[in-house]
Amino acid sequence: MSPNLTYVIVVGVLVAAGVTLLLERSLTRVLMGVILLGNGANLLLLTGGRAGAPPIVGSAPQEEMSDPLPQAMILTAIVITLGMTAFLLALAYRSWHLNGHDEVQDDVEDRRIMDLADRDEVPDDDVDGDDDDEESPTTDERQLSTTAKGGRAG
């Protein structure tokens, strides 16, 4: 059975709209993106199943039964989407309550890294030019080397 072209187009539109909304800064739009993406995934799983009789042993011959795996996966996806929706609603409510808006602000460290990348510079903590592949001796190794030289450890 090949999937209906209408289902494929609807899945594509739902997933594209969901991903677009996920990339916004407003938590309300992110919430809508999660819901649309979840519905798109559910419809995609639904198109993957075989239509037929209910998957109850003894009700129909096995060849005529529908595949129960997509149905179980859709139920799991519904639960996951519901949990994400509840979490994002709580996050948006808390942000609205504290700040009066639900916009996600830039992180100071992220902004610094973006500025360094724009200028194509090396961060301050890696200015010495040493490769980070070589590990510095641990505290235990320093204590052992100090003890071996005749000094006191600790």
Image: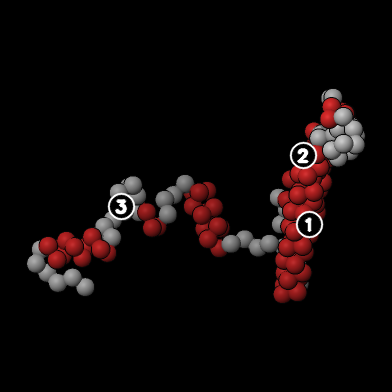
Picture residue at 74% right of the left edge, 45% below the top: 19
Q: Which residue is mark 2?
A: 69
The 10 Å Cα crowd at callout 1, few under 14, some 14 to 19, many 20 or more, is some
- Dot 1 corresponds to which residue? 82
Q: Secondary structure at mark 3?
A: loop
Residue 91 location, quadrant: bottom right
* Of pointers 1 and 3, the one earlier in the residue sequence: 1
Of marks 2 and 1, which one's residue comes earlier in the chain? 2
Residue corresponding to mark 3: 135
- The three-letter code of the residue at mark 1 reads Leu
Would you call the spot at circle 2 few (<14 residues within 10 Å), some (14-19), or many (20 or more)?
Answer: some
Colour approach in the figure:
secondary structure
User: Which disc is residue 116 wearing?
Assistant: none
Amino acid of disc 2? Leu
Category of crowding for the residue at label 3, using alpha-carbon neighbours closer than 10 angstroms: few (below 14), some (14–19), many (at least 20) = few
The extreme left residue here reads 150
Give x and y (percent) for residue 21. Answer: 76, 50
Quarter of the figure with the N terminus: top right
Image spot of residue 64 (x, y percent):
88, 29
- Closest to the camera, between mark 1 and mark 3, is 1
Q: In this view of the protein, which residue sits in the foreground, 120 or 101? A: 101
Q: Where 99 sits versus 26, above or below? A: below
